[in-house]
Image (cartoon, helix red, strand yellow):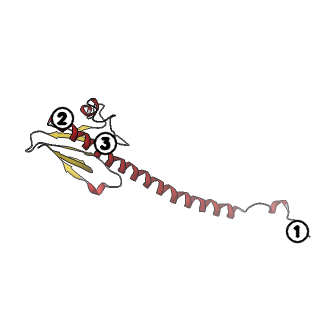
């Protein structure tokens, strides 16, 4: 009726197992590349939203005080614990805004140029992952997405 196989013939061969493992590895590699790119794009989108929120808070601060927060001629970075503390202490923003990575490469930068004519302030990101072609240099600091705020 049925053919009986010897005990050593049951299961998969080594070649079949290797083929399945190779196919699964290729699929996992393709999926992981898409996940990494999606995560990078999400961080970059958050960076743009953060800078836009900070710009709005800085403009309201300007309306109240007639100038942007002073930096004493230096760049301040989101890696510092007192980054734009004038905005958090004045309730212009509810919490300190930091870059998703917030290290020496990926961070937000702010500076008020009070000696310029007209005076202005700049807020931006020092590094982007997916949008690195957007960069520009402001006072020897490369900002990959930034907004310049002019005092009137």
Residue 132 visible to the viewer: yes
Q: Which mark is residue 46?
A: none
In the picture, the quarter occupied by the C terminus is: top left
Which of the pair 63/70 is nearer the observer? 63
Left/right placement of residue 89 relative to residue 31 reads left
| Residue 118 on image: x %, y % | 9, 44
Give SS at disc 1.
loop
Left/right placement of residue 43 relative to residue 14 reads left
For marks 3 and 2 on the same chain, the one whose residue lies earlier in the sequence: 2
Q: How many marks?
A: 3
Q: Residues within 10 Å of mark 2 (few under 14, many from 20)?
A: few
Q: Which mark is residue 3?
A: 1
Which of the pair 7/94 is nearer the observer? 94
Distance from disc 3 to disc 2, alpha carbons, whole Å, reads 27 Å
Mark 2 vs mark 1: give the one in front: 2
Residue 57 occupies which quadrant of the picture? top left
Residue at the image point whose x is 21% and y is 36% from the top: 61
The residue indicated by pointer 2 is 64
Residue 39 in the image: above or below residue 67:
below
Residue at the image point whose x is 64% and y is 62% from the top: 20
The residue indicated by pointer 3 is 107
Name the residue at the right extreme.
Answer: 1
Left/right placement of residue 75 relative to residue 128 reads left
Distance from disc 3 to disc 1, alpha carbons, whole Å, reads 70 Å
Q: Residues within 10 Å of mark 1 (few under 14, many from 20)?
A: few
For marks 2 and 1 on the same chain, the one whose residue lies earlier in the sequence: 1
């Amino acid at each position: 009726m049925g053919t009986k196989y010897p005990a050593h013939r049951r299961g998969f061969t080594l070649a079949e197992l290797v083929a399945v493992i190779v196919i699964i590895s290729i699929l996992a590699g393709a999926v992981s590349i898409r996940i990494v790119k999606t995560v990078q794009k999400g961080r970059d989108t958050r960076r743009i939203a953060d800078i836009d929120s900070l710009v709005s808070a800085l403009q309201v601060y300007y309306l109240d005080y007639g100038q942007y927060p002073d930096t004493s001629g230096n760049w301040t970075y989101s890696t510092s614990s007192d980054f734009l503390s004038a905005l958090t202490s004045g309730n212009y923003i509810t919490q300190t805004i930091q870059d998703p990575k917030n290290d020496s490469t990926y961070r937000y930068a702010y500076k008020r140029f009070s000696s310029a004519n007209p005076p202005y302030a700049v807020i931006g990101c020092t590094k982007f992952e997916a949008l690195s072609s957007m960069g520009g240099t402001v006072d020897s600091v490369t900002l990959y997405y930034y907004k310049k705020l002019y005092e009137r």
